[in-house]
Image: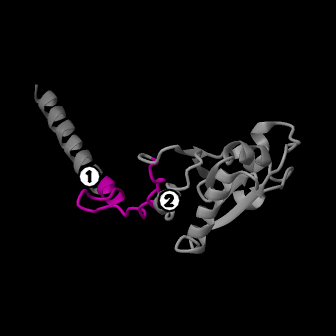
Amino acid sequence: MRNILLTLFNLTFLFAALVLGGKFIIGELLPSQKEVPAQSAPAAPVRRAPSTAGLKNTKLVSIPADVYKGIKAKPAYKEYLLGNKKHVVQIMSPTCPYARALRGRVWQLLRGEYGDYYDEGVIKVQGSVELSCNGAEDCPTFWIFEHCSGLCMINPNTRQAVVYSSRDPQPVEAILERFKNW
């Protein structure tokens, strides 16, 4: 019986020594709970595009990555898809009175207070236009003609475009104002 008690005492002592020794050894290797680990710098906030809510005939669309890949093969109109400044693009017939009214309003606004925020581009089309693309999904020219037939604002930094599909020139200022810091 004495041997069993001695063995239990030795095992208890050995266990206590391991626990205390382990605490000191592991405690040196691990940071204490009081220390606050260094945190990395917070990520830059993601800027979201303003909503098109309340702007009739206006929608925000993403420009597919394939369109940007297709710029090497078909560089026409690449100036509207690249750069650091937003581009207001209008595809118009020079003889259409609605297109001229819209164009006149855009021109007036971009020569005024919105000229610092946007570059202007007008693609004048008369008759029919032949687009020579292997696939429409990777052709910048096709994408621009499909989406900018009224008026669109392309933001190359976000690879998005605001598409306005109406003949009415009145809401253009509200659209330019809402998206000027986008």
Q: Secondary structure at mark 1?
A: helix
Q: Position of residue 44 (x, y in %)?
A: 46, 61
Residue type marked 2: Phe
Residue farthest top in this picture? 1
Q: Position of residue 69 (x, y in %)?
A: 77, 48
Q: Is residue 152 visible?
A: yes
Real-space CA distance between mark 2 and mark 1, rounded to the nearest whole angstrom: 60 Å
Q: Which mark is residue 74?
A: none
Q: Quadrant of residue 1?
A: top left
118 on left or right of 123: left
The verdict on residue 41 being magenta is yes
- What residue does disc 1 label? 23
147, above or below 49, in the image? above
Task: Residue at 83%, 55% (x, y): give it.
Answer: 76
10 vs 76, nearest the viewer: 76
20 vs 124, nearest the viewer: 124
Q: Is residue 85 visible?
A: no
27 on left or right of 181: left
The verdict on residue 7 being magenta is no
The magenta span reads 25-52
2 vs 1, front mark: 2
Residue type marked 1: Lys
Task: Residue at 65%, 67% (x, y): give it.
Answer: 119
Mark 1 closeness class: few <14, some 14–19, many ≥20 residues within 10 Å: few
Q: Which mark is residue 179?
A: 2
Give the mark, 2 or 1, whose residue is nearer the N terminus. Answer: 1
Q: Secondary structure at mark 2?
A: helix
Q: Position of residue 121 (x, y in %)?
A: 71, 62
Instruction: Check if mark 2's residue and mark 1's residue have beta carbons within 8 Å.
Output: no
Task: Residue at 59%, 72% (x, y): give it.
Answer: 115
